[in-house]
Image: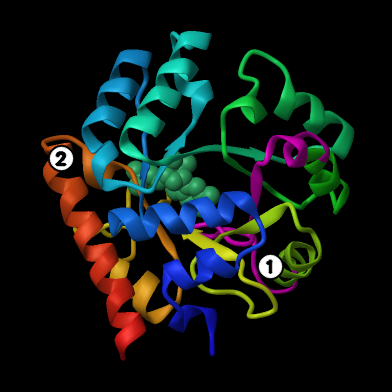
């Protein structure tokens, strides 16, 4: 039986990676496969949005380097909200350097990403050493990594043989728990796909973003987590109403996949 036909609960029970186990358990508890892409500019906005939308999401995705007044207290408060609302933290850092450099970037600097982000991601453009470098920092802390097997934007170059290489590297590295991409990529082990570029109303934006619906992504393509940003907090939107709508749409798309 394909992983796409199994429940998140079943997959969590048989998974060997602690972050994947926890993610599946949260998804099942909250009946949510929704991740919020919280791309706001300040600490106060990020904390307010995470507190409001927290009940409806399984993962809070951050770009911590866009917060103009970042400080260590922001991280402490995000961790409090993650416990309060039962979600994981995913720093969408997109590491892309040699193994030695990404070790420094992941564990150190101002952001100390490995200390708080359950999940981060990387491009494999430098070769497999990037995964090994990140794993040296992340495995002892119980973290997980996603590979950018594809992107959502128009004209993106992660296709064909490059995407296939991502899959091969993911299968043979235990630190990798899955992919950013648009579909289920392999049955060789249970690698989780998270998909950005999800929207119910718009087709895209002026800078190349392209949106597809939860049904296309989860039911038809077998992806596991939908990542939604401006569809939830964009101009004129009520974030709580929209988060509930995307949570319900994502869950319905998942149930439809299971029961067809
Ligand atoms: F890896 C990717 C990708 O391929 N597309 C993306 O859009 C990441 N993203 C992120 O998802 C992007 O950096 C934003 O943080 C988010 C999408 O936000 P939106 O407001 O839903 O378009």
Report crowding for label 1: few under 14, some 14 to 19, many 20 or more residues within 10 A (C-alpha). some
User: Quarter of the image holding residue 212?
Assistant: bottom left
Location of the N terminus by quadrant is: bottom right
In terms of depth relative to the viewer, which is nearer, 77 or 92? Answer: 77
Q: Does the magenta stretch include residue 184?
A: no
- Residue in view at x 44 percent, y 83 percent: 5
Task: Where is residue 27? Give x, y as percent.
Answer: 38, 57
At mark 2, the secondary structure is helix
- Residue in view at x 79 percent, y 37 percent: 97
Depth check, mark 2 against mark 1: the one in front is 2
Task: Where is residue 120? Give x, y as percent.
Answer: 61, 41
Dot 2 or dot 1, earlier in sequence: 1
Query: Does residue 91 lie above or below 178 as drawn?
Result: above
Q: How far apart are marks 2 and 1 (CA)?
A: 35 Å
- Residue in view at x 31 percent, y 30 percent: 50
At mark 1, the secondary structure is helix
Report crowding for label 2: few under 14, some 14 to 19, many 20 or more residues within 10 A (C-alpha). some
Q: Which colour scheme is used?
A: rainbow
Task: Where is residue 83? Give x, y as percent.
Answer: 39, 32
Q: Is residue 89 visible?
A: yes
Name the mark on residue 75.
none
Task: Where is residue 32? Give x, y as percent.
Answer: 31, 56
- Residue in view at x 32 percent, y 46 percent: 57
Instruction: Give the magenta part as a residue range.
Output: 136-161
Query: Does residue 87 lie above or below 70 as drawn?
Result: below
Location of the C terminus by quadrant is: bottom left
Q: Name the residue under label 1.
A: 163
Query: Does residue 232 lie above or below 16 as drawn?
Result: above
Number of residue marks:
2
Q: Mark 2 points at which residue?
A: 240
């Amino acid at each position: 039986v394909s992983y796409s036909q199994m429940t998140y609960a079943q997959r969590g029970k048989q998974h060997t990676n602690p972050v994947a186990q926890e993610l599946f358990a949260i998804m099942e508890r909250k009946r949510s496969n929704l991740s919020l892409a919280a791309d706001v500019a300040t600490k106060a906005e990020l904390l307010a949005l995470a507190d409001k939308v927290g009940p409806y999401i399984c993962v809070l995705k951050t770009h911590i380097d866009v917060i103009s007044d970042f400080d260590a207290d922001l991280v402490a408060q995000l961790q409090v909200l993650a416990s309060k609302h039962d979600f994981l933290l995913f720093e969408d850092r997109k590491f892309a350097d040699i193994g030695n450099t990404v070790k420094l970037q992941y564990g150190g600097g101002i952001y100390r990403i490995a200390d708080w982000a359950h999940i981060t991601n990387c491009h494999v453009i430098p070769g497999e050493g990037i995964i090994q470098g990140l794993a040296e920092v992340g495995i002892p802390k119980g973290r997980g990594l996603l590979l950018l097997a594809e992107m959502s934007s128009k004209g993106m170059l992660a296709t064909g043989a490059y995407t296939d290489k991502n899959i091969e590297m993911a299968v043979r590295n235990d630190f990798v728990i899955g992919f950013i991409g648009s579909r289920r990529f392999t049955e060789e082990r249970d690698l989780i796909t998270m998909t950005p570029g999800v929207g119910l109303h718009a087709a895209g934006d002026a800078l190349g973003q392209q949106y597809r619906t939860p049904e296309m992504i989860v039911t038809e393509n077998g992806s596991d987590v939908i990542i939604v940003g401006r569809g939830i907090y964009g101009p004129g939107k009520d974030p709580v109403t929209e988060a509930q709508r995307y949570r319900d749409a994502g869950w319905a798309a998942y149930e439809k996949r299971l029961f067809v």
